[in-house]
Image: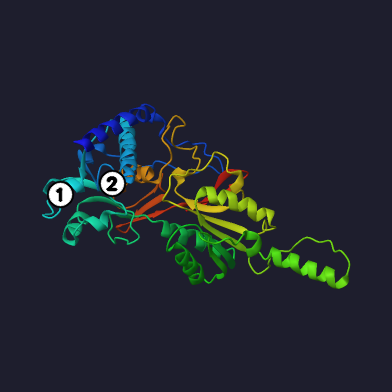
Amino acid sequence: MNHYKKLVILLFCLIYTSSCSNNFVINPNIKQGFIPIEKPKVNYKYNKLPKIINIILENSYDESSTQFTKGVIANYFYHKETKGYSPKLNFFYLDKVSLDKCNLKNLKSNHSILFINLEFYKKIQKNCLREIINLKGVIVNLDNKEIEKGNVINVSRTKDFKNILSFARNKNNSSLIMTDKLKGQESSIESTWKGLGGNVIFSNKQEGTNRSLSELLLLESSKERKRRLSRNLSIPLEGTPRRRQDLDSLIISSSISKARSLKPELDYNFGESLTVYFIPEWNNNEVYSKRELDLNDIYLVDMPWMFNTQSYVSERNSLKKNRNFALGFDSLETLLLQLNPSSSNKFIYKGLSGQITYQKGSLKRKSLKAQVKEGSFEFIDY
């Protein structure tokens, strides 16, 4: 019964959020540079929407499942408090289901929201996986292996870095790539950049190396050339070291805190003319500060909810920013949009996790690209 107790606690914790749910509205005065998160402009026919919705999770104790649940419940309270729509939410945990027999009888009669996190595939048999994926409803898939179905929102950090690298390639050609503790990601980022026609001047996995930015920018070589010339001429020489001229950009794949330290170091080492692109890690709980001065001028890609949003969610919402929360919130909205008569064929939803589009029977999600200007995030596009 522990998972039921946990659900009750989650509901209690979100009561405060729901009490100010009238603030979950579009701000008509969104200024340039604010991150756009908007409820879709559709007329919901709530009498046509389901009275029961299944929420299917791997287990009740995993942190990603907990955050996803909080997101679903937050959006549930929005619709309940503002529109009076309050379907019954049935929570099912796959570690409690008899998966050897794939007993899903109780799930097939209602629409479901299924959250597939990174451990899901390891714990389920193929025959049961097929049946689960074919349940009617919306599936949020966090695995890099995409599921090609019209009701699946495929979400991965890999798609995000392909998005920002494609954007970067339109501006830059030769890059220095710095990654941090992401096994397998370095070669993937490098191969993606090369596949786009970019040149990789140097790719450096920071873990286990002592090479500094000064060395990588060849500033030490510049200083050594000056010393040799000074000795040959037998006179002291004045001059500013020059960084290498064969690169125009730096791609950082790391934690937010590591990026905060690298950008000032880059500026100190005469690399301020380099364009910097940042791909944040997803496997930690770091959040952005209200003013990110150490990330100034950096281009980055992330879910809109992670940025300092001021256009949608109330300032009174004290929930810590979390990507799985954003996905939970958006999954419920996406399900309702797909089942709502006026939006069942096509819609665009600018959600907490990004822009979700549905057309020609297919769901697509894109994170948001932004640039840090004077410590604030300025919206570019999806």
Q: Residue at x 57, y 68 (%)?
A: 202
Residue 346 visible in the shown view: yes
The amino acid on which the numbered mark 2 sits, given as a three-letter code, is Leu
Distance of label 1 from label 2 (alpha carbons)? 16 Å
| x and y, in percent, of residue 243 in the image | 70, 64
Is there CB contact under 8 Å for labels 1 and 2? Answer: no
| x and y, in percent, of residue 258 in the image | 54, 51
**Residue 335's disc number:** 2
Q: Does residue 164 sit above or below 326 in this rendering?
A: below
Q: Does residue 144 sit above or below 8 in this rendering?
A: below
When asked about the image quadrant of residue 360, the answer is: bottom left
When asked about the image quadrant of residue 74, the answer is: top left
Residue 351 visible in the shown view: no
**Taking 57 as reference, is 20 left or right?**
right
The amino acid on which the numbered mark 1 sits, given as a three-letter code, is Lys
Q: Which residue is mark 1?
A: 108
Quarter of the figure with the N terminus: top left
